[in-house]
Image (cartoon, grey):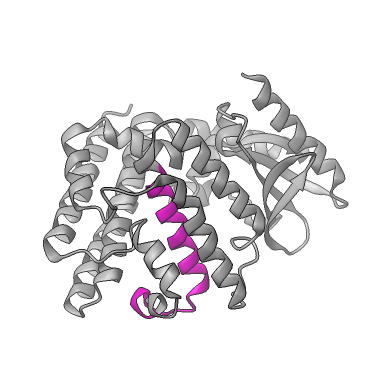
Amino acid sequence: MNQRNIRLRELAKEYLKEINEPICFASVGGSVARGEADSLSDIDLTIYVNHQTDQAENVRFAGEYIQLDQRTINEFPMEKQIATDPWTYRFLTEAYIIQDQGGTFSKRKDWVDTFYTSRQCKEKMVKQVTEVVEDRIDFAFNCLNEEKEYSATNAAMGAWAEAAFLFQFLSSGSLSTGRLMPTIQKIDQHFHRFVNVAPFPSEIDVTEISTIINRFRQELKQKGASFDFGLSSIQDELAERKSKRLIAAGEQLNLIWQTYGEALWLYFETSDGLSLEDYFSTLTLESQLGLARIGFSPSNEQEIQELGRLSVELLETAKHLAKESN
């Protein structure tokens, strides 16, 4: 455990003392939970409280950034919920507990750690993700039939991503978004096929990438979009941190991939039901051109078909991994 990781865990505990309300449970996630924090890491902090709440916010505390997710205690997952829907609650496998009223969280975490190693759990997750992937691939082809190529691309990429995250989790136990692309790169032939059909540019000045997402965020704020968490200026700073880390590591594609995902997140949270095509047309030309450079480009039918095949291949590998479990 490095000193940076220890400091951020302790800082999360100090922050809890500053909150003027009783907290039932609290945990950190992400790199801090995994023991992988570096000088650019922030703190993902989830707390459960007795009153009704559903709040996410970015916080500056003691010179660090905290991404706070505050939930009501009624949302604390029960064993039956987890067993029924393990893919949704997989974040619990990486949770590092920092506050635990009555020891309930620790007991639940012990159960989770055992359950998620079981064949029953893994096969259930494969079933869940398979349904998601099939739905997204079907939706992608429906969009193509309606000449909505942007929406088709997004759906096909979403299908592949879900299958890839399942493969990563079953092969390494990791939930890290940052590790996904390096994990897939190890599957050499699959990775090269993916790169050939993914909507990412072959050449881009990677130093521009954080600027692209930050300008997009600024445009949404100017238009009055109601998504305080995602449009916070702290998100701009976090984007720049991510960019510095991945550029320094030589992970250009990983940076584009993660920024593409962040832009999609902003779209989903601010679109009010608009299709990607209609939404895209409301943006300034500068934002359209910028987003095109990080993957907002229409794919053709052959590319969508290949993304579907790649998704199915990852699912098949995941099925074998699940069957090999005790």
Res. 158 image quadrant? bottom left
Magenta region: which residues? 255-278
Residue 180 in percent (x, y) is at 37, 39
Q: Is residue 88 something that shows in the picture?
A: no
Q: Residue at x 33, y 50 (%)?
A: 161
Locate residue 91 relative to residue 260 in the image: left or right.
right
Residue 214 in percent (x, y) is at 54, 59
Please state which of residues 72 and 239 is positioned toward the viewer in this rendering. 239
Residue 3 vertical placement versus 264 (above, below): above
Locate residue 117 relative to residue 93 in the image: left or right.
left
Q: Residue at x 24, y 71 (%)?
A: 149
* Residue occupying the far left of the picture: 302
Q: Is residue 265 magenta?
A: yes
Q: Main secondary structure of the magenta part?
A: helix
Res. 1 image quadrant? top right
Locate residue 22 relative to residue 82 in the image: left or right.
right
Residue 95 in percent (x, y) is at 59, 37
Q: Is residue 223 something that shows in the picture?
A: yes
Q: Residue at x 48, y 43 (%)?
A: 90
Residue 37 vertical placement versus 128 (above, below): above
Q: Is residue 231 magenta?
A: no
